[in-house]
Amino acid sequence: MSHTRLALHGGESVKKTAFETGKRFGLEEARELLEALEQNTLFYHFGGKVKKFLAVFNDMYQVRYSVATSSGTAALHVALGAAGVTAGDEVITSPITDQGTVIGILYQNAVPVFADLDPHSYNMTAENIEKKITAKTKAILVVHLAGNPCDMDPIMELARKHNLKVIEDCAQSYLTTYKGRLTGTIGHYGCFSTNDFKHISTGDGGIVTVNSGDEADYFTTHAFADKNYHRHGNSVMKDLEYLAPNYRMTELQGAVGIAQLQKLEWICTRRNEFGERLNEGLTGLKGIIPMKITDGGWCSYWFYMLTLNLDELSCTRAEFSDALTAEGIPNQAGYIPKVLYAQSLFQERQAYKNSHYPFDQGTYDYSPGSCPNAEQILNTAIRLNLNEFYSNQDIEEMIIAVKKVAAYYAR
Ligand SMILES: Cc1ncc(COP(=O)(O)O)c(C=O)c1O
């Protein structure tokens, strides 16, 4: 194998056929959309589509209450607001995530504090979270990255000990389970995104689960997504006790969501099969460290990400990525360009232009090296696209290509 000429050097590429594709939207969505329009209102509280979308979701997740929002970022902000996160609080979260995870924290004038990750599952750990707890910590916002669940038992135990709220960012973890429990139902709130790049899409949108099952908690959460309007049955109450944004989902999104939810199980099962096969096929190769699925976890693989052990390879990460691309396997070197705290917003401590608030309320460590595992992950990761429409052959060719490139560069 080590003598096989890389496509990068003029050899034959592994992948000679296009990846299988498919249609995400069909007549099912169109029918729901038509019905939504025929209602003569697209407002969630007057129509039936968002309500049905949530009812189907609640049934699937076995939760009593959830709230629909305009995006995943909005869902997270709503959960933070409902959890009581406010000016001067600290929220512990992951340095490797979409910026949508931290936007709501800052809009509540609270401060994101980053905890380091497990080097191979890429997820937050109770041990590293504990090191970041201060008297100002109000909540832990865990991210189940790529559909891999965080090890939630010790995290929930820690939260109980310190009386902290736990919010789960499930934007990438639809139907992911941890010890048989669905992510998004374990913490106090679970937040989902239905943006166009997620397992299911409503164009944009989101959902917050209210896991206490408590009606007052649900009412607070619901109102936080609707300018603090309390709309229940025929009663409407405007309660402007504190600030709450308008993050409402429209009937059009709800309509598409109903049809999309019907496909969710198939999508997640397919991705799980592909991800598991990749993990199996990429185990035991010199220089390749497969993704570590959390013990007791079932991963719905929003993407597949391995890391390189560069001590065992004679190439750089960029060369490895280029070689894989030349073999016909699309991939990205890394996930996000840098850990969140390395972004200028944190380096300059400027969430709002010409202001250092709320960063000037305390001392926060955003220095390079403060989450070494997270930085190492982003410096060595290779992210492979996954899609439910891929064929088994596509996956096998991905494995063959990684094996070919790894064998060529193995020291
Ligand atoms: C982990 C994570 N959190 C939050 C978000 C934000 O979701 P949205 O784009 O719907 O606002 C995303 C979306 O990329 C995400 O991947």
Image: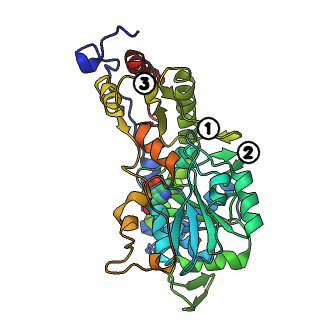
Residue 240 image-quadrant placement: bottom right
Q: CA distance from mark 3 to mark 2?
A: 30 Å
90 left or right of 368? right
Q: Amino acid at mark 2?
A: Gly
Identify the residue position indicated by label 2 in the image: 180
Q: Amino acid at mark 1?
A: Ile
The image position of residue 242, as x and y in percent, is 54, 88
Identify the disc placed on residue 398: 3
16 left or right of 176? left
347 left or right of 373? left
The N terminus is located in which quarter? top left
Secondary element under disc 1, as helix, strand or loop, is loop
39 left or right of 144? left
Secondary element under disc 3, as helix, strand or loop, is helix
The image position of residue 246, as x and y in percent, is 46, 78
Depth check: give the residue in front, 143 or 301.
143
Residue 379 image-quadrant placement: top left
Label 3 close to label 1 by CB (< 8 Å)? no
Q: CA distance from mark 1 to mark 2?
A: 14 Å
The image position of residue 127, as x and y in percent, is 67, 53
Comes first in the chain, label 3 or label 1: 1
The image position of residue 361, as x and y in percent, is 50, 80
Depth check: give the residue in front, 11 or 275.
11
- Is any part of residue 384 visible from this angle? no
Identified at 34% across, 64% down, the residue is: 344
Q: Residues within 10 Å of mark 1 (few under 14, many from 20)?
A: many
Disc number lying in front (3 or 1): 1
Q: Amino acid at mark 3?
A: Met
Q: Is mark 1 within 8 Å of ligand 1?
A: no
Identified at 51% across, 86% down, the residue is: 243
Identify the disc placed on residue 382: none
